[in-house]
Image (cartoon, rainbow, N blue to C red):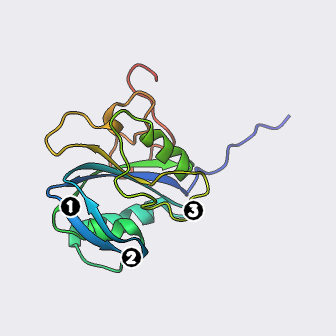
Amino acid sequence: MHAHSPGPPPRGGAYILHLRIAQDLALEVGALGRVLLPAGRYAYIGSARSSLAGRVARHRRLAASKSGTMHWHIDYVLAHPAVSLARVESLPGCEECEAAQRVARRPGASAPVPRFGATDCRSGCAAHLFRVGSPAGGRGAYEDRRGAYEDRRGAYGDRRGAKKDRRGR
């Protein structure tokens, strides 16, 4: 009997960008047109098929430099000076829509722009951008870690897969 090797860890997967928007925004966002985003805390769920680390690094660069090529809906938001990237959660091997639906089910989560980040979604997601709290509010919808995914090292450590909280949930 041969021992089964699980193989290399997945290179693709989903991620959650945790954003803070300091003021109400009215932005032109590609084919979506003009969108309105009230000030607050947001969670954007995206994915990459082959290089999750590369995709997240690109978003980090855009958020820091506030300039670059606009490929995805979220790029228009990240490039705005009133937007800061607070944190990134990596979800290697996770499906984007699965993560989006988990965030959408959290108490207080809302999708202020229908189809944002989800124009090609075939899973019925309302959007892949969710408002999860006011700027000065308490814990956001994604911060209640019961059942949530989290890369506790922050940006991109060596830890793979979904993480559990201290109570094993």
- Counting residues from the start of the chain, the first of labels 1 and 3 encountered is 3
- Counting residues from the start of the chain, the first of labels 2 and 3 encountered is 2
Residue 56 picture quarter: bottom left
| Residue 61 left/right relative to 15 | left
Q: Residue at x 45, y 43 (%)?
A: 159
Q: Mark 2 highlights which residue?
A: 30
- Can residue 147 be spotted in the picture? yes
Quadrant (top left, top right, bottom left, bottom right) of the N terminus: top right
Disc 1/disc 2 C-alpha distance (Å):
18 Å
Question: Callout 2: helix, strand or loop?
Answer: helix
Question: Callout 1: helix, strand or loop?
Answer: strand
Q: Nearer the viewer, mark 1 or mark 3?
A: 1
Q: Nearer the viewer, mark 1 or mark 2?
A: 2
Q: Amino acid at mark 2?
A: Gly
Residue 142 picture quarter: top left
Disc 2/disc 3 C-alpha distance (Å):
22 Å
